[in-house]
Amino acid sequence: MTPHHGEILFRLILAAILGALVGFEREVHGRPAGIRTYLILCLGSALIMVLSQYLSFGMMDKLPPDAMRVDPGRIAAQAVTGIGFLGAGVILRYKDTIRGLTTAACVWVVCAIGLSIGAGFYLYGSVVAGLTVVSLVGVKFFERRLKKDWYQEMTIVSQDLAGQFSRIQDIITKHAFEVINFGLSKNLEKKEVTANFLLRIRTSHPDRQVLQEVFELPGVKRVDLT
């Protein structure tokens, strides 16, 4: 049975609202996909699902029983596959840091929400949208207070002074950082030494006071902590 026009419009509007709701949280946190992206994505997914239902139920009434068999989920399945490419576009990698995984997951789940609303499952789509927003806000609040391993890369340029890097390592140890890897290079012409430290610390948020203390050492010209 083909849904009434009013029913279809309600599905599309509800999908747009739920998509915008999830997108609002991402927009506030400055993510590449925001309100407009999620709204359009969820709205388009809902329309795709409505078309799938129309093709499977509406057109079958006009054809002989043995003319063709239509799978109502075929078009929707292609939407889910295509969303994977869209989600991959928001995943960015900078050095050892990967950003955008949560945004990509949100893009995928908003597609599912749109498909469910388009199919008429208002309760399930609304619940999933609500749980998604709650998880984005509530779990982030918990994660900020969770002690976990942080990896920091420190680069230090200093004059080639005796015992200089022993003093640097003492400061690093004092701030509870663990040295995972260490690299050293010398510039004989400038009489400079460049050291690269890969550090690890377990805390809710790393303390950058170590930067100031290392920079205050005699002979240190530059300190980078990323």
Image (spheres, grey):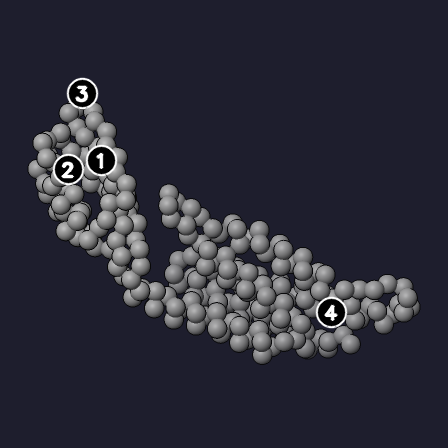
Q: Are marks 1 and 2 in contact (CB under 8 Å)?
A: yes
Kindly identify which residue carries mark 2: 165
What's the residue type where badge 2 is placed?
Phe
**Residue 27 falls in which quadrant of the image?**
bottom left
Number of numbered discs present?
Answer: 4
Residue 195 circle label: 1
Kindly identify which residue carries mark 3: 189
Mark before the other along the chain sequence, 4 or 1: 4
SS at badge 2: helix
SS at badge 3: loop
Nearer the camera: disc 4 or disc 3: 3
Q: CA distance from mark 4 to mark 3?
A: 75 Å
For residue 172, say whether it is visible: yes
For residue 9, say whether it is visible: no
Q: In the displayed structure, does residue 52 sit left or right of residue 39?
A: right
Most foreground residue, 173 or 92: 173
The relative height of residue 34 versus residue 96 in the rendered view (above or below) is below
**Residue 2 falls in which quadrant of the image?**
bottom right
Mark before the other along the chain sequence, 4 or 3: 4
**Residue sitting at x 52%, y 51%:** 88
Crowd band around label 1 with a 10 angstrom C-alpha radius: few (<14), some (14–19), many (20+): some
What's the residue type where badge 4 is placed?
Gln
Q: CA distance from mark 4 to mark 1?
A: 63 Å
Kindly identify which residue carries mark 4: 53
**Residue 83, percent from left and from top:** 59, 56
